[in-house]
Image (cartoon, grey):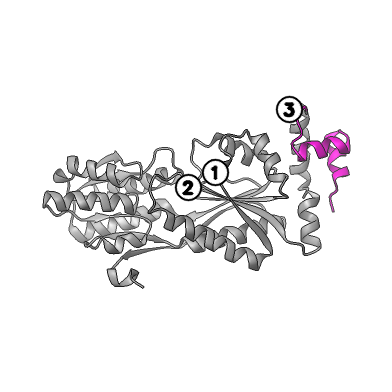
């Protein structure tokens, strides 16, 4: 087994220096940090906190970092499914999960976040809700200090996996079903947040469909907001045959605008949230199993603990129309 001494010898530093780098001590030069981290990666060294837990069957400790800054209570359904799925799977995987909201650490530097997490014995991370604006989280991932699984973020390295549905394909699938069912030739596409990784993928899927079917495509940014999508639909939907939305919330906003204007346009969404069943108009959507996504993320974290390299993992998506009777209990 590779030891901290092996790392020190490969990096040409003292054992104490390796320890300082692992624990993110201040006053260590960037060159020294780089050499130590390079040695760790080359030797595939697993720090004692992880190795000891694995070898002795002790419970490893990981953090579920989750973003609640959504601006709407509706998305709590997704958040709760992530938490439920992660906690349920963690028990079977012998991993202790604690939940930390990103708003608790978004004022910290990567070094401060590392010290904060390591002070609680955390060796692994599952991150939900990361955006392109979260530069410090990106630096934390690039440091490779923690075994990390990202949800809906396409960043992979030897210590980092990503788990998500194939957003580009799913957007393509649901839009194609809606367009063909209604023989639409022009489409208003309401995309999500420009700082979201999934937004890029979903837009890519929509553009591929438009090119294949020679659709007239108008793209407007809805920021995953029901209100903004409603305003966009009021302004542009009359002149389009169909409205494709990158989220269910935006689909609900667009549909409500169409109802108020007393015109019909087919609308489809993305996510499969329960609220879609109460809208009164049936819409195609992509159902994501958020519980399963989080469970898969925990299983992937365990594989990283066991020495597997990071990878891209797709979970299944399903095209559905949610009915009222499907969501009542």
Element carrying mark 3 = helix
In the rendered structure, find residue 60 and report the number of the disc placed on it.
Answer: none
Q: Residue at x 18, y 53 (%)?
A: 184
- Report crowding for label 2: few under 14, some 14 to 19, many 20 or more residues within 10 A (C-alpha): some
Tell me whether the residue at label 2 lies in contact with that at label 3, contact meaning CB atoms closer than 8 angstroms: no
Boundaries of the magenta span: 1-27
Which of pointers 1 and 3 lies earlier in the amino acid sequence? Answer: 3
- Identify residue for label 3: 30
Q: Nearer the viewer, residue 44 or 195?
A: 195
Q: Residue at x 79, y 46 (%)?
A: 43
- Report crowding for label 1: few under 14, some 14 to 19, many 20 or more residues within 10 A (C-alpha): many
Task: Give the Cα distance between marks 1 and 3.
Answer: 27 Å
Q: Quadrant of residue 300?
A: bottom right
Tell me whether the residue at label 2 lies in contact with that at label 1, contact meaning CB atoms closer than 8 angstroms: yes
- Identify residue for label 2: 68
The location of residue 90, given as percent across then percent down, is: 63, 63
Which of pointers 2 and 3 lies earlier in the amino acid sequence? Answer: 3
Q: Nearer the viewer, mark 1 or mark 3?
A: 1
- Identify residue for label 1: 102
Say which quadrant the C terminus sits in: bottom left
Element carrying mark 2 = loop
The location of residue 193, given as percent across then percent down, is: 39, 41
Element carrying mark 1 = helix
- Report crowding for label 3: few under 14, some 14 to 19, many 20 or more residues within 10 A (C-alpha): few
The location of residue 325, given as percent across then percent down, is: 29, 72
Q: Quadrant of residue 279?
A: bottom left
Q: Is residue 54 left or right of residue 310?
A: right
Q: Is residue 282 magenta?
A: no
Q: Nearer the viewer, residue 239 or 85?
A: 85
Vertical arrangement, residue 314 with respect to residue 5, above or below: below
Task: Give the Cα distance between marks 2 and 3.
Answer: 34 Å
Residue 51 seen from this side: yes
């Amino acid at each position: 087994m590779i030891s901290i001494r092996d790392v020190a010898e490969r990096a040409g530093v003292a054992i104490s220096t390796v320890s300082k780098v692992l624990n993110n001590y201040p006053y260590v030069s960037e060159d020294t940090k780089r050499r130590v981290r390079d040695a760790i990666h080359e030797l595939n060294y697993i720090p004692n906190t992880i190795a000891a837990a694995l070898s002795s069957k002790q419970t490893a400790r990981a953090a579920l970092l989750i973003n609640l800054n959504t601006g709407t209570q509706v998305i709590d359904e997704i958040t709760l499914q992530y938490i439920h799925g992660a906690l349920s799977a963690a028990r079977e995987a012998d991993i202790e999960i604690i939940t930390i909201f990103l708003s608790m650490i978004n004022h910290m530097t990567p070094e401060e976040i590392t010290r904060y997490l390591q002070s609680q014995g955390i060796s692994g991370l599952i991150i939900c809700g990361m955006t392109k604006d979260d530069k410090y989280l990106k630096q934390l991932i690039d440091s490779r200090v923690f075994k990390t699984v990202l949800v809906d973020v396409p960043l992979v390295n030897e210590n980092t996996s990503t788990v998500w549905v194939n957003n580009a394909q799913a957007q393509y699938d649901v839009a194609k079903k809606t367009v063909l069912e209604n023989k639409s030739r022009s489409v208003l596409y309401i995309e999500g947040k420009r700082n979201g990784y999934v937004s890029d993928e979903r837009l890519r899927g929509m553009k591929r469909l438009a090119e294949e079917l020679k659709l007239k495509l108008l793209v407007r940014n809805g920021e995953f907001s029901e209100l903004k999508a409603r305003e966009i639909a009021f302004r542009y939907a009359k002149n389009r045959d169909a409205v494709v939305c990158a989220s269910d919330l935006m689909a609900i906003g667009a549909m409500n605008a169409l109802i108020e204007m007393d015109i019909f346009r087919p609308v489809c969404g993305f996510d499969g949230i329960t609220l879609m069943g109460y809208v009164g108009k049936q819409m195609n959507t992509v159902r994501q199993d958020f519980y399963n996504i989080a469970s898969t993320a925990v299983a992937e974290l365990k594989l990283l603990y066991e020495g597997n390299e990071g990878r891209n993992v797709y979970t299944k998506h399903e095209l559905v129309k949610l009915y009222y009777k499907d969501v009542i209990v």
